[in-house]
Image (spheres, helix red, strand yellow):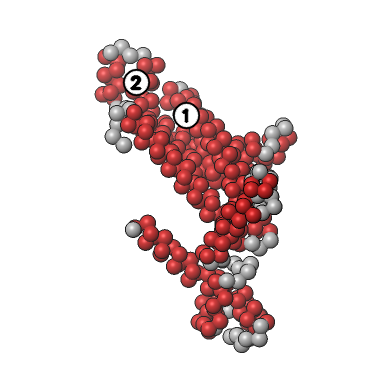
Amino acid sequence: MPVLAVVGVILAVWYLAVVPMNIKEVLTAQERAGAEVVPPTAKERRDAGRFGLVFNNFDLIGSSWSMDRSRLPAPHQVAGELWKSTWVEETTGRRGIVRSGSFSNRSLVYHGGVTLLATVLGFVIGSGLGVLLAVGIVYNRAMDMSVMPWAIISQTIPIVALAPMIIVVLYSVGLSGLVAKAVISAYLSFFPVVVGMVKGLRSPDAMQMDLLRTYSANANQSFWKLRLPASVPYLFASLKIGIAASLVGAIVGELPVQRGGLGARMLGGSYYGQTEQIWAALLVAAVMAAGLVWLIGWLERRTLRAMGVQA
């Protein structure tokens, strides 16, 4: 019930926001159809406030929720675009899987799969790099003093500015497409893993470390029997952030490449004014992120139970 209540509030706010966002285009269309609008000229409407236009033309706002190429599409328009670009495209489309045997490149199923592949590959690379860096930072003071500040600084650079440069550099050495997107995805996902693992590996207190020393445990045994098990909850918490960041990196990496993926789909929608297409891709990305985070959470519960920890 709380989830449904939140969804209902979001939909209500969305429908209300559609009216002022689209009111200028609606009044222009109504004027061309012969209706009287207030104010009567396009120049006056351009300078007028959106809420003022709504209240002065309250009887003309009905088409705000159904107009084509709207600034903000209504939820049912986005739902229609989702249905058309998934089920309809794949089952009845000329390029759909039913007729061609492969997913249509006009389908969100195809573009979601492209983004998902780059996300998973980037996440694996970024997480592995993050864990290795964390171990080095914890056990090597030189790395702690040198690598950690650079890792922090690297996250202050906007990925939108960095992504085209990464793609150009990788393309010059013969790497493009999936690898380039995965590198951008890994760039965003490694940092939370580094921070989480460093904190987790340093979480055992002095008494626990002293106890291992009384058993004459060496550094290798301390790592495998104390530091690594203690870091597992921190690791999974950072992995949840990392997988979401990895998805964002994959989408950003698809913007300059434009060879498929949800990022390319959003960019195509912005080129042609198809806001329903943009919002549909956004919703697919959100559902994908929720599914990936849920999967990490499921793995966390299974792992902690196997370790004898109550999840």
Instruction: Decide if residue 12 is on the left or right side of residue 25.
Output: left
Mark identifier at residue 225? 2
Classify residue 29 as left or right of residue 211: right
In-front residue for pair 141/49? 49
Quadrant in which the C terminus appears: top left
Percent x, y of residue 99: 67, 48
**Residue 113 at x, y percent in the picture:** 59, 43
In the image: residue 159, left or right of residue 216: right
Q: CA distance from mark 2 to mark 1?
A: 17 Å
Looking at the rendered structure, the secondary structure element under dot 2 is: helix
Is residue 127 visible to the viewer in this orientation of the structure? Answer: yes
Can you give x and y, in whole percent of width and height, for residue 97 in the image? Answer: 64, 47
Q: What residue appears at the point 63 percent right and 67 percent down from the top-left corner?
A: 69
Q: Position of residue 275 (x, y in %)?
A: 61, 62
Give the residue drawn at x 68%, y 59%. 271
Number of dots carrying numbers: 2
| Quarter holding residue 223 | top left
Q: Residue furthest top?
A: 216
Dot 1 alpha-carbon crowd within 10 angstroms: few under 14, some 14 to 19, many 20 or more: many
Determine the residue positioned at 69% across, 37% down. Answer: 176
Amino acid type at circle 1 is Val
Please tell me whether mark 1 sits on a helix, a strand or a loop. helix
Tag 1 residue: 131
* Label 2 crowd bin: few (<14), some (14–19), many (20+), radius 10 Å: few
Going 49% across and 44% down the picture, which residue do you hit? 244
